[in-house]
Image: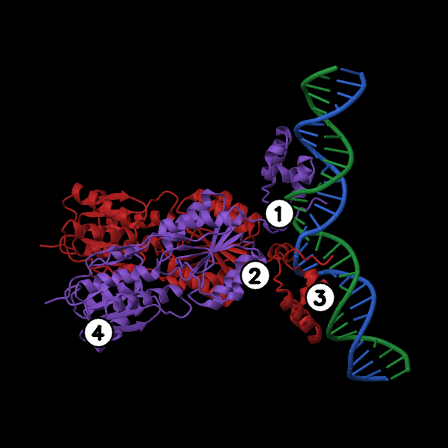
Chain colours: A purple, B red, C green, D blue
Amino acid sequence: MPNTRSVPTVDDVARIAGVSTATVSRCLNSPDRVVEKTRDKVMKAVKKLGYTPNFGARVMAAQRTFTIGAIIPTMENAIFARGIQAFQEELRRRGYTLLVSSSAYQPDIEEEQIRALVARGADGLLLIGYDRDQSLYDYLKRQDVPALVAWAFSADSEQPSIGFDNRSSMSALVQQVLNLGHRSLGVISGITRGNDRAVQRLQGVKDAVASNDLPPETLKIIETPYEIENGAIAFSRLMSANADLTAVICGNDVLAVGALRQAREMGLQVPGDVSITGFDDIELARIVTPQLTTVHVPHREMGRKAAIELISMVEKTSPGISVELDSSIQLRESLGPVCC
Amino acid sequence: MPNTRSVPTVDDVARIAGVSTATVSRCLNSPDRVVEKTRDKVMKAVKKLGYTPNFGARVMAAQRTFTIGAIIPTMENAIFARGIQAFQEELRRRGYTLLVSSSAYQPDIEEEQIRALVARGADGLLLIGYDRDQSLYDYLKRQDVPALVAWAFSADSEQPSIGFDNRSSMSALVQQVLNLGHRSLGVISGITRGNDRAVQRLQGVKDAVASNDLPPETLKIIETPYEIENGAIAFSRLMSANADLTAVICGNDVLAVGALRQAREMGLQVPGDVSITGFDDIELARIVTPQLTTVHVPHREMGRKAAIELISMVEKTSPGISVELDSSIQLRESLGPVCC
DNA sequence: TTTCAATTTGTAAGCGCTTACAAATTGACC
DNA sequence: GGTCAATTTGTAAGCGCTTACAAATTGAAA
């Protein structure tokens, strides 16, 4: 029964080409195992019918998808864009397809997305940061789907990861700030709950203060979600409550840009009246006026290496190693010495 | 044979729960068609085994995935971020999962991604702009996968779409520029090849010039890919070749921001020495100094409505209609009257 | 207690593909 | 031409799930 109604199947191709379905399958998957004349016939039939293999069936039969999934906290600002782009490029080069979804920084949505991607046959997963329910890691292990953590690195986690040390990077940055004479700092942190990177960064700020023998009261801390608008609001709140602040350390560039905008709106000179720093060194950092002093993160390198490592894990040539990348401090216009 | 080795299947669950596989399936898909006591047994077995349905098999059997795919030209800058975010939120609200991939503005990659998504069982696709090979549309039709075009609207295409009129919006913006006395305009357009939105925008610029009875030589046009850096380079080239330009119209905000940065570097006052305009009104536009005059695009509305419409198409409650949204001009600091 | 319609459950046939294994073909060599 | 190993192709058994249909169960009404 020639199956006229719908999408062509391997059987249709086999019938048209006058061969068996096995041969059709082989033509598509290991062409060298089939003699040229036959292959031509089959390919002609494939073209004629506009046949595309059904993915579900293929996955089920072959137990393999060449798809990698990535769940990032947000697509709305550019924090992850560069790294993911590089990740995708490298995957593509190696014959894998990337599917991305975003969790809006919400653990329950992240879990949902992880399950969705696994269910859809992702061969491996890229996850941002360590902090998630152990049951999720168990689930992934049970499903035999390797996962690589990125944007974070912790020597004492056995979870494979590729990233940098958020804590010490931030600490180094704040050290620079302190070196310039600042003794009263505002901190606009991202929400730390469920976000180990934000936790680490905040801890880094505290480390620097402590190692300079300054009291904890040196810091005025606000937590707020990573959005420009929130950066502006937090900055405003911070400055009006603490007139003596000479510098504001932000948990990332997005918050810092908001702070910067608000400073301008309040008629404050940056860095004359107040210095502002960011973290991540996204494109934005060099576009705003004044340009943002921030921590440079090797986004592209991280993305590329993550792809390579994750594929190794998927193909079982690596058990999953952890790699620490260097970050560096980008001194730009928004940080200056404490004035007068 | 108790299948100890690997991931649990529906058979395992059925065996443990002491029911048939059909019942297990029903518990998961239409729980109300199964009596509570049985359901409890099954759910307990599911939990005990940590069972998750195999997606491939499910798709194959049910011919449905509740997955929507979107292929956007780039994730690297924020042009599509807001709209896609809204798109995803609405999809999620309605029980669909979004999978995104990006094409780097390359038609062959886009085709690959479309096929990948269809193959992975996407129930419907969101595509950016109209301009792609007819064979791709044919393919989608053959696979019975509805596609909705976004970020563009053309009354005379039969392809369902949701977007705005890039051409007339741009024309209106340029009209404003001309009203301010500018008579020699630089244009930094995106690459028009394979990008109907860029074509339309450029055409809009020309429309405005023509309808003011100005000669085509009024415009000095450069095409370059949408990247900040390219905007800067193009601006520099434009200004050094044409000393008399008083305004530069950019194909989008990303290019405009690059132009702005370059102007600053060249010591040019904006808008004192030269006015600069963008298009899209992404977040960036309000962050740079001076703030960018641009065309506001209803990103979130577009995303949300796209989700609603695409789902209707998938569920066959709509044949796929086209919707035109309004855009509006955002006059901000970067545009001023021609000086002296 | 019967009867019978409504509800719940089970049986088994696919969904479209891959692949182990068997069968058929090829052609180098005697 | 006949042998035999190597190559090519075909047969058929799944992969894990859904669902049409049939069988079994339930319980209200007679």
Report x, y in % for residue A245. Answer: 20, 72
- Tag 3's secondary structure? helix
Residue wearing tag 4? A239
Q: Quadrant of the N terminus of chain A?
A: top right
**Amino acid residing under circle 2:** Glu
Residue at 36% from the left image edge and 69% from the top image edge: A191
Alpha carbon distance from label 2 to label 1: 30 Å
- Tag 2's secondary structure? loop
For disc 3, the neighbor class at 10 Å (few under 14, some 14 to 19, many from 20) is: some
Closer to viewer: mark 2 or mark 3 = 3
Subunit of label 1: A
For disc 1, the neighbor class at 10 Å (few under 14, some 14 to 19, many from 20) is: few
For disc 4, the neighbor class at 10 Å (few under 14, some 14 to 19, many from 20) is: some
Residue wearing tag 3? B16
Closer to viewer: mark 2 or mark 1 = 1
User: Which of marks 4 and 1 precedes in the sequence?
Assistant: 1
**Amino acid residing under circle 4:** Met
**Amino acid residing under circle 3:** Ile
- Tag 4's secondary structure? helix
Residue nearest the observer in this picture, B18 or B125: B18
**Amino acid residing under circle 1:** Ala
The answer to whether tags 2 and 1 share a subunit is no
- Tag 1's secondary structure? helix
Alpha carbon distance from label 3 to label 1: 27 Å
Closer to viewer: mark 3 or mark 1 = 3
Residue wearing tag 2? B315
User: Which of marks 3 and 2 precedes in the sequence?
Assistant: 3
- Numbered tag placed on residue A62 in the rendering: 1
